[in-house]
Amino acid sequence: MENLNKESKYLKAKERVGQLKKFYANLCTYILVISALALINYLTNGFRYAWFLWAAFGWGIGVFFHAIGTFNLNPFFGKSWEERKIKQFMQNEEKNEKWR
């Protein structure tokens, strides 16, 4: 039983590290690409029209929601809510089995 518990913790930790790697890769790519677009924007028209901000804003929304999911910042449907609901449903199922 203890090995199963350790393996379960290891798999959860490995999944978490994978999520963090994906988020940081997305963030680094965002910074590099938006910086390159800003440079191109500056070299072509000297920021008379800052068109790169449209890309920064659109992609930034995606990075924001990716951060919310990665760092469990969603107050309504975060990991803690999910775990509480799973426990609640498991307890309800156990009660129903006792009465059958």
Image (cartoon, rainbow, N blue to C red):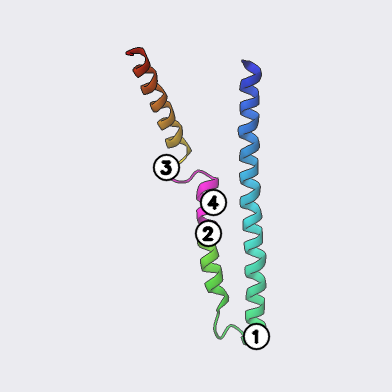
User: Label 1, label 3: how many angstroms apart (C-alpha)?
Assistant: 45 Å
User: Label 4, label 1: how many angstroms apart (C-alpha)?
Assistant: 33 Å
Which callout, 1 or 2, points to the residue nearer the camera? 2
Which callout, 2 or 4, points to the residue nearer the camera? 2
Q: What residue sits 56% from the left and 68% below the top?
A: 56
| Residue 85 horizontal side relative to residue 42, left or right | left
| Residue at image mark 4 | 67
Mark closer to the chain start, 1 or 2: 1
**Magenta region's main secondary structure?**
helix
Mark closer to the chain start, 4 or 3: 4
Mark 1 nearby-residue class (10 Å; few <14, some 14–19, many ≥20):
few
Q: What residue sits 65% from the left and 25% below the top?
A: 7
* Residues rendered magenta in the picture: 62-75
**SS for callout 4:** helix
Q: Position of residue 58 (x, y in %)?
A: 51, 66
Contact between marks 1 and 3 (CB within 8 A): the answer is no
